[in-house]
Structure formats: structure tokens, C-alpha cells
Amino acid sequence: MPVAHTLEGPLSVDVLGRQDPELAEILLAEQERQTTTLQLIAAENFTSPAVLAALGSPLANKYAEGYPGARHHGGCELVDVAERVAVDRAKALFGAEHANVQSHSGSSAVLAAYAALLRPGDTVLAMGLPHGGHLTHGSPANFSGRWFDFVGYGVDPESGLIDHDQVRALARSHRPKAIVCGSISYPRHIDYAAFREVADEVGAYLIADAAHPIGLVAGGAAPSPVPYADVVCATTHKVLRGPRGGMLLCGSELAERVDRAVFPFTQGGAQMHTVAAKAVAFGEAATPAFTAYAHQVVANARALARSLAAEGLLVTTGGTDTHLLTVDPAPLGVDARTARGRLAAAGMVLDTCALPHPDVRGLRLGTAAVTTQGMGETEAARIGALFATAVRDESAGRRVREEVRNLTGRFPPYPGQ
Ligand SMILES: *Cc1c(COP(=O)(O)O)cnc(C)c1O
């Protein structure tokens, strides 16, 4: 892996350090935090030095409202090329007829998908938030819950699996204009064909919010929603390992509606440094090395799930097909909030999450970041053991913290820093 660029060159932290030591110190301390603790947040990853280079480039200075060849600003000839490269790479990577790479975030992409297909007041069927739906799937605190009439489906409380009978029954009784499949914490593959069948039966659009699994899809380690969904929304910064941002994929017949829903309906100028960084990430994701990475991410998540189950934690659905898993720490005698605090003290960073019994909170872990660092199944199993030790016994935190420091020292995300 090439040496990270952040401490070298004209656009480096060195430059920032000379001009603004206060901010440089914060950046370096954050780099230290990221590299000496274990990043188990399922939505996080370490981008490559090349992606960071594109993000820190002069493309950040460019205004570019509109699309390549049809901009509202002058001087867009070169950023037009960058965006065309990003779009072409996304289309090839996912086998999609159309790609929009301008969404500023995953949530912006979902907003654009709704804007392209729905009118305020329409009924939408999506995974309920207490079962693992995202804020954009109908939270009353989010535009989605305010502007649309959301009906929530859930997972079976025993198996933890999506209850497709319930999805069908709710679709038949509520006749939604769109059905959303996708979650922030579902550890298994999503059966896109089953959702498509229900959508067709009731005449609904199918929107796949593949923010989490899209990187696995790119690496051939998860089924693709592209052949089934009318619109696919995704992030580029989770397993896909690109810059923070969103994107949309769809067929040619919806291309114009989706593009207009992004700009000018929900966004202004595109962030061309991020668009260029997305192009870099799509290029990386098309390599055999990324395919191997995506499969290793899943193998590591399975090894971690086995290790946690052996330590006595309750693993939702008994394991995982993906990069993420959720566990209930109750058998170790602590609730999820307490466990998260103990894990943080031991240098393990992760989130609490919903569980199939919605009144109980669990812990969500992911292996995208540690796999980028080069860790394999042996290390994943070790992380499971350290995790259980830290959760069980508050006084073991310091000892585990030292072991975590040791492990992260052997697997630096940016070697040479
Ligand atoms: C992460 C995520 C999003 C939103 O992404 P942001 O970039 O944080 O806005 C949307 N939907 C799902 C299912 C997600 O997991």
C-alpha cells in the first residue's frame, strides 16, 4: 500500500500546521485516535491515499451546477471529464444503465429517489425504524416522516429475518406508491426478487437503499439490487471505501427524473472534488484486490460473529452474510449502553442499535475498516474475545486497551505514517 499523502506535499497537514496549529493539532489527534483504536462502526472505513488526494485537491474550488456538457458555470471542461469518468465507472461497476454521482450523502440520495418517484402525502412501505430502518425511512424527525405516509414492516422476533409475509400483507392493505428495502443493521442478504414481486403485485416502485451493502455488491460478495429496483440509492463511504457521499443508479427510462431530482430539485452545485474521489474509489472497486477485500470483509464478520457467540453473546440471526452483525450483550450481564461505554474505554469504537425485540437495544459491529487494515479471521476472532472480556469486566478495560493498541500497531491503516 502506498504511503499516505496527508503529511507530505503542498496540501498537507504540514502546511496547515504552519498556518493554523490549533486545527492541525486536532487533525493529527484524530488521526492518532483512528489508528490506535479499533473502528468497529459498521458504516466506517479507511479510504485510500488516492481518494484522500482527490478530496484535498483544487477541484474543491470549482463551482459546477448542472451536469457535464450542461453547466450553469464556466470553466467546467475538466470537471466535466471527471464526472463523466465517475458516471461511466459506476455504470460499469454495477451494470446500471444510468448513474448519478452528485448526491452529497446517502440521505440526499434517498431524498432524491423520493423526489423522483413520489409526491408529498404518498404512502411508502419501508422497514420500521425500531427494526433497523434508516431515519430517511419515515422518522417523524426527518423530512421522510413529515412529507410521506410511511408504513413500517419488521423482522420476525424469533429468527430476526425480514418477515416477507408481513411485507406482502401490508403492501396489499396499504397499496403504497413505493416500497423501500434496505436497513442500517440487517446482517443478512436482502431478497430483492421477493420485494420486486410484491412491488409488482401492488403496482409500487421498488427503491433499494443499499447504503450499507453496495461495497459488497461492487466486490461480488452480495447480491445486486440493480436488476430488481427501479432506483438504487447508496453511499460511497461505507464498505465501498470512497469519499463521504451518495449516488443513485437506475434504468434509462428514469434517468432524467432522477437527475432533475438531484439537481436542481434537492441540491445546488456538485462537489467536484468528491465526485473525482468517487471516480477514484469506483476505479479501485473494479480491481481483483477489491473483490478479495469484499470477500475478506464477510469472512471476518463471520469469524467475529462465531467468536462472540462462543463468548456467550446473542448474535442476531445466528450470524451474518455481510460486513455487519448485531449482538445482545444481556447474557454477559450488561445492557448495550453500559457495554458500549466499557468498550470505548478499552479502545473499541462501535454503535448501539435496534434488535428484533425493539424494546431491547443491542450493539452493531462491522469489519470493513479492520479488513482494510489487513486484519484477517484470526484477528477478527481475537477482537471477539477482547470484546467479551471488556464487556464482562470493567476492570479489564486497561489491559484490553493495551492489547488493542498492540493489534492496531501491527495493522496501520496508512503504513508509514
Ligand atoms: C448510512 C445510511 C444512509 C445515509 O447516509 P448518510 O451519508 O449518513 O446520509 C441512508 N440509508 C441507509 C440504509 C444507511 O445505512
Image (cartoon, rainbow, N blue to C red):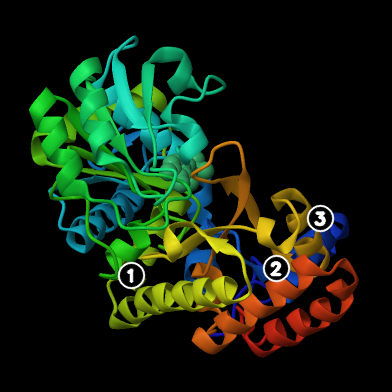
Q: Residues within 10 Å of mark 2 (few under 14, many from 20)?
A: some
- Rendered location of residue 42, percent (x, y): 53, 59
Residue 198 appears left or right of 377 = left
48 with respect to 5 (left or right):
left
Which x, y percent locates residue 128? Answer: 43, 31
Q: Upstream in the sequence, badge 1 or badge 3?
A: 3
Q: CA distance from mark 2 to mark 3?
A: 17 Å
User: Which quarter of the picture shows residue 204?
Assistant: top left
Looking at the image, is mark 1 or mark 2 earlier in the sequence?
2
Q: Earlier in the sequence, mark 2 or mark 3?
A: 3
> Mark 1: which amino acid?
Ala
Q: Quadrant of residue 246?
A: top left
Instruction: Residue 34: give its label.
Output: 2
**Labels 2 & 3 near each other (Cβ < 8 A):** no
Name the foreground residue: 185 vs 221: 185
Q: Which residue is painted at 40% across and 72% down in the image?
A: 298
